[in-house]
Amino acid sequence: MNPTNDLPQLKLLADGMLGRLARWLRILGYDTVYARDADDDELLRLARAQDRVLLTADHGLAVRRGARIVLIEAQNLADQLRQARSALGPPPRGALSRCVACNGELVRVDKSELAGRLPPYVLATHQEFHRCPDCGRVFWRGTHVERMQAMLNDSG
């Protein structure tokens, strides 16, 4: 039995002001829905209905009742990440386990299934690939991962 299955899953909902933060929280492995156009009432309804922690930079929204809310007061991304990680604790899954575009859980895929979908150079130089079952995007550890890691270390 896996003891982590008994723990409640941490799920997040980022309001329209926190799109960049939502993307980076996904990179870290947090289940993060980004509600770009939702108004305050809709954000609260979604947070309650989906049992998500609402992340907001809106002081007025942060004081409303009816949902678990984390007020993100930092202005720059590194400080926002630092504040969110401090408030939320470690992500339930490891970094690079979620789709940065749609939040789907990535699954490992054999590179033989990707012939014709990726440039031949990528297939020849990488062995491990992941695909998002929700949107179909394919991910691999390219040089961008080093830049992402540097950003995460700065916010850590």
Image (spheres, grey):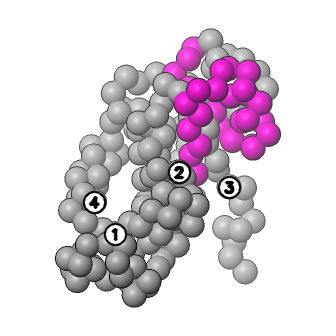
Q: Residues within 10 Å of mark 1 (few under 14, many from 20)?
A: some
Label 2, label 4: how many angstroms apart (C-alpha)? Answer: 18 Å
Residue 72 visible to the viewer: no
Residue at the disc numbered 2: 102
* Number of on-image labels: 4
Secondary element under disc 4, as helix, strand or loop, is helix
Q: Quadrant of residue 156?
A: top left
Secondary element under disc 2, as helix, strand or loop, is loop
Residue at the disc numbered 4: 145
Q: Nearer the viewer, mark 3 or mark 4?
A: 4
- Residue at the limit of the structure toward the bottom, as seen here: 112
Label 1, label 3: how many angstroms apart (C-alpha)? Answer: 26 Å
Residue 88 point in image, percent of width and height:
56, 43
For the point 59% across and 26% down, the residue is 37
Q: Nearer the viewer, mark 2 or mark 4?
A: 2
Secondary element under disc 3, as helix, strand or loop, is loop
Closer to the N terminus: mark 1 or mark 3? Answer: 3
CB within 8 Å, label 3 to label 4: no
Q: Nearer the viewer, mark 4 or mark 1?
A: 1
Q: Amino acid at mark 2?
A: Cys
Closer to the N terminus: mark 3 or mark 4? Answer: 3
Q: Residues within 10 Å of mark 3 (few under 14, many from 20)?
A: some
Residue at the disc numbered 1: 140
